[in-house]
Amino acid sequence: MASSRTRVQHSGAADSAVIERVPIRTLTPAFQNVIKNPVMDVLMLSRIQFGATIAFHYIYPPLSIGLAVLLVIMEAAWLKTKNPVYHQMARFWTKVFALTFAIGVATGIVMEFEFGTNWATYSRFVGDVFGSALAAEGIFAFFLESGFLAVLMFGWDRVSRKMHFFATCMVCLGAHLSAVWIIVANSWMQTPAGYHIVGQGMHARAEITDFWQVVFNPSSMDRLFHTLCGAWQAGAFLVIGVGAWYVLKNKFTDFARASLRIGLIVALIASLLQLHSGDSSARGVAKNQPAKLAAFEGLYNTTSNAPLTLVGWVDEKNEKVIGLQWPGLLSWLVAHDTHATVTGLDAFPPTDRPPVEASFLFFHGMAAIGFALIGIAALGCFYLWRNVLFQKRWMLWILVFSALGPQIGNQLGWFAAEVGRQPWIVYGLLRTPEGLSAVVKANVVLTSLILFTVIYFLLFTVFIYLLNDKIRHGPDEADLTPAGKLALPTRPNT
Amino acid sequence: MNLGHLDLNTVWFVLVGALFTGYVMLDGFDLGIGTLHLFTKDDAERRTLLNAIGPVWDGNEVWLITGGGALFAAFPNVYATVFSGFYLAFILLLMALIFRAVSIEFRGKQPMRWWRQTWDIGFSAGSLVASLLIGVALGNIAWGIPIDERGEFAGTFPGLLKPYPLLLGVTTVALFMMHGAIYGALKTEGVLHDKLRRWAMRSILIFVICAATTTVATLFYVPHMTERVHANPWLFTIVLANMLAIANIPREFHHGRDWRAFLSSCAAMITLMALFGLNMYPNLVYSLPNPENSLTIYNAASSPKTLGIMLIIACIGMPLVIAYTVSIYWIFRGKVKLDRTSY
């Protein structure tokens, strides 16, 4: 991504300095090659490819997780109230869910393969720890999710209503479990725990000493909760956006109003939880990855009464932040004491610092979106409570576009988390260039990068086209009168 | 019997083998249906075929994902060497799997002819290429690939396209087509059912020719892949079981017992994978021309502690997985009926 470019193009000198400080591993020819060809080298291409494929993949799983929660709520509401509009909603959103799930699966396999194809040395180093989490994800999450997804999608007329609801709950559980294991794996890269290093040089690798310490490593639970809140927001705001659009267009009114009601309540809860989770995560970062926190805030000098930048940017050359700052707020957020000392980047040699400008912008962009979403959800709920929401057209337009908010926020947050971990691939243990595959050449990675770019562009176009088509077509009228096994003594819409 | 003592590494060799066997047995028929997809021109027939695998293909593919994860966890050096060594081949496999997956989902979303035609080709080509590449990869593992003393792949991409691996690739395509046609026959009725039975008979013929060629080629050119059966003649019963299973398919078809024909086909795949595993053991990747650099279940494995933890995970998880799989196949048993939730 942008950050990798700034980092890698630093010319050979900076990178060789990085490599000389390698704590465990020694140089292999591939890494020496990286230093000799600093422009479009295999490191940069591999980083762009991994960044691009994970960013594209990460559009879909949060939507699946969030929509799964809403599907559970909709089906529960249907079972409880017997109001067929909830059945109609569940049917409509199941189709959107299936679409996001299919692309999520297709782009997810890429991620599992890419550790081995592009980051083979990393894979050897972490396999003992990281591989276990991936395997657990497959066994505990994916089988559950994909199995019951069949019932969710095709089982409407084959199983009873309660069995269908159970299947929807299992899909939702599976989606959440997959988040658990992949966040555990990624958090271990941020804050490794429960391992020891065995072997020397090229044969060094991390081995598990305590499985539960790996699972509950210092950042995993904070980051899991933060990611899940983001996913719930993604699902809720999409439902809100579509509902608001229908109200504006005066179409499918009952469906739209019910969508807005459910969506706004979930969105407000998720956004407020996200605020709490963001605060807790940031304090975790301050404790476990101080260089990352310093980069997030552009804090070059260790200081007490550290300020929080509300709006601004980093002047990397002069090592200072330009913008509106609130003195002492960062200290207060980190330690609940405005006089607390916050570690700055000066505590780390330049070779151990993440790219400051990029980390700062990603982090602040994410935080700004987070606060905006709280405001939008709160205002929406307020208008809903006062029963004036459906008349406030400007608010409905904001709600339509708010569907993009969690998507952008999730992407920026993910960038901030991963760029902020640099120059490490496993924090404090293995540097990013050291993780590369030893036998993969730049031209091969360039080929795959071009292929991925073309295909993902095509997939995205088709996804947007089909989603748009689905939304324009709207919910099915026939779903208001469920037939077959679903038939219920219905009562008129309220 | 020369299988060594039953240690954790061997257990994981068997478990990873079982996951990949589950994959070829289950996703094998999805890929086979995909390869056969374009043989019918009729939209309703194509939809019926798609919906025959509709509720299950996703879960079937999870066997590959979990197999990959288990390989990563249990034998990280194999995962790293093979995935980085077969870089381009695996990227192509990914593309094929992506196209197959999204084509299934996208195809039915629009009624236009060109739209459906496009995703039909994506589905079929994706399935064909994926089957071929899986076979070629297995062929290379069997034949042996150059590995240096660091355990890294020392060959080239064109070097992976030797005749023997390509032959195994074609054999795999034929095997999956046979398996897919039998599964299709199980799930359809009427004209399409008869059509699928004809395709199944033809693909059995193609498969038997390919398999015979592969067997002869293995005997002549890949002696290390027959050593264990040579040394333990009683293992020849597996070869025999394999032949009987294949021969049984036309017989069951003749009696109209599609379900038993499908089970025979599964048995044929299990015995083939068992023979592959038995002859590879204890190697996971055979190194040619320097067999001493081969990646084995010992030099490529994770720590015993991790293998132990993973075994606990597998013991908890696999019964659940089998329970889900069985219940989904049970819920969606019987012939395919198109309705408005269908693809």
Image: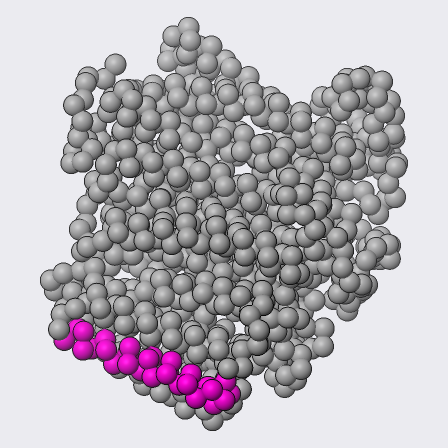
Q: Is residue B327 left or right of residue A372?
A: left
Q: How many marks?
A: 0
Q: Residue furthest left?
A: B190
Q: Residue furthest bottom?
A: B220
* Residue B103 in view here: no
Q: Residue A55, image x and y in percent?
A: 56, 45
Magenta-colored stretch includes residue B250 = yes
Viewer-closest of A402 and B309:
B309
In the rendered image of this protein, does residue A400 appear above or below residue A162? above
> What residue is shown at x 33% (from left), y 75% (from top)?
B268
* Residue B141 in view here: yes
The overriding secondary structure of the stretch rendered in magenta is helix
Q: Quadrant of residue B172?
A: bottom left
> What residue is shown at x 63% (from left), y 32% (from top)?
A222
Q: Is residue A373 left or right of residue B154?
A: left
In the rendered image of this protein, does residue A344 appear above or below residue B67? above
The quadrant of the rendering that contains the C terminus of chain A is top left
> What residue is shown at x 74% (from left), y 26% (from top)?
A312
Q: Residue A211, image x and y in percent?
A: 64, 47
Q: Residue A442, image x and y in percent?
A: 66, 64
Q: Residue A401, image x and y in percent?
A: 47, 26
> What residue is shown at x 37% (from left), y 68% (from top)?
B128
Q: Quadrant of residue B78?
A: bottom right
The magenta span reads: B225-254
In the rendered image of this protein, does residue A301 appear above or below residue B324? above
Viewer-closest of B183 and A104:
B183
Q: How is the image coloured?
A: one colour
Magenta-colored stretch includes residue B276 = no
Q: Residue furthest top?
A: A386
